[in-house]
Amino acid sequence: MAAVDPSGKPFPPLINDLILRAARGEKTEHVPVWVMRQAGRYLPEFREVRAENEFFKVCRTPELACEVTLQPLRRFDLDAAIIFSDILIIPQAVGMEVQMVPGKGPTFPQVLKEPSDLQHLNLNCNVKEELQYMLDALTFTRHTLNGKVPLIGFCGGPWTLMAYMIEGGGSSTQSKAKAWLYKYPEDSHILLKSLTKLLIEFLIDQVVAGAQMLQVFESHAGILTPECFKTFLLPYIKEIAEGVKSGLKRLNIDVPMTIFAKDAHYGIEELATTGFDIISLDWTIKPMRARHEAGQKVTLQGNLDPCALYGSENDIQDNVKKMLKNFGTQKYIANLGHGMYPDMCPESVQTFVNAVHNYSKLMNES
Ligand code: CP3
């Protein structure tokens, strides 16, 4: 990871490197844990910030992004921070408008309807210039974290971003986006390739700005057929791992990279060969099967059902015990299988995090 910030100022020394060791397959005294969407509406202090600031304003203001990134770390003994931002800032960078509509989620007033619409996008944009605010938020947050835990940078995967740009928001079938793959395969590849190039630049920029780990969210992977996955997702994910790793090698930097291809069970074996160090799992796959498919080389992350956090303290602890037994304590990062929901209680995260630390310590000692 970068030892100095872009202005040459040294970053504070890292105190808790547990998650980086787990990512590299090195021995860990207990299992590291963080939570997808650990900064979010389930925290009253987050809702307070959001009450006065529009969603993308929080993303674009480094002090606010830093504040909400640190909120969960003040409450829980987490082993990583994830920068507060959104995967949809890439569609914004290429010229699409995205609004965060309360109760509805992200909405694009104008979507991609047909291939000629690609001409209206600035697919050759200067990512660093367009998204400098996110890079500044990373630098500011890494300094403010003062070495407590590593800071994770992230982006959406090319397929997931393409799906949002065509659907214009959430969709249970993704049928409009999937139609492109069958109707306009060549134009789909043009869009995916352009996004991939931007994402490689963006991820390298994030590391230079201060990110100590990277995660790519292919949240809509599971809606594809295994064949579409192989044609439209896998090659670009591989290109991202290779492009980012080789770009960082030239700068003498190495950071662990995580791929979260939600619901893509059929693709785990192939994802394990892409160059990503960690495969993040949703809750619908059995840990043993995932380990079998992924092999011994990669670290696994996940995969507690987020809804398990609605259970009692005892139930959460039992579910964590089962999860740890199945994954083991090495080459493993505990997390949920997807993000926190707004109606969850903060105390459940406390129970989850402490249970991971306590039981994995006991397992390592026995
Ligand atoms: O704490 C963290 O995990 C870091 C922050 C983070 C956010 N979005 C903040 C956010 C991360 C890593 C993301 C990524 C993201 N954004 C993904 C990939 C992960 C996933 O969920 O699959 C996706 C698909 C998006 C797009 C997006 N942004 C959605 C679907 C939503 C939810 C809409 C809703 O109303 O529930 C958002 C908004 C969003 N991004 C929120 C947060 C905390 C909640 C909105 C708010 O604050 O009003």
Image (spheres, helix red, strand yellow):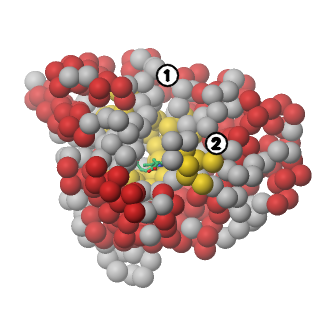
Type of amino acid under label 2: Gly
Of the pair 362 and 132, the residue shown nearer to us? 132
- On the question of residue 235 being in view, the answer is no
Residue 51: x and y in percent read 39, 57
Residue behind label 1 places its C-beta within 8 angstroms of ligand 1: no
Q: Looking at the image, which residue is at 69% across and 23% down?
A: 225
Q: Which mark is residue 293?
A: 1
Residue 22: x and y in percent read 31, 42
Residue 334: x and y in percent read 31, 35
Could you tell whether 91 is left or right of 218 in the image? right
Mark toward the start of the polypeptide (2 vs 1): 2
Q: Looking at the image, which residue is at 48% across and 57% down?
A: 55
User: Which element is circle 1 on?
Assistant: helix
Q: Looking at the image, which residue is at 48% across and 60% down?
A: 54
Q: Residues within 10 Å of mark 1 (few under 14, many from 20)?
A: some
Of the pair 225 and 166, the residue shown nearer to us? 166
Q: Image quadrant for the N terminus?
A: bottom left
Q: Quadrant of residue 198?
A: bottom right
Could you tell whether 366 is left or right of 309 in the image? left
Of the pair 287 and 303, the residue shown nearer to us? 303
- For the residues labelled 2 and 1, the Cα–Cα distance comes to 32 Å
- On the question of residue 260 being in view, the answer is yes
Of the pair 57 and 117, the residue shown nearer to us? 57
The residue where tag 2 is placed is 169
* Residue 141 versus residue 277 in the image, above or below: below
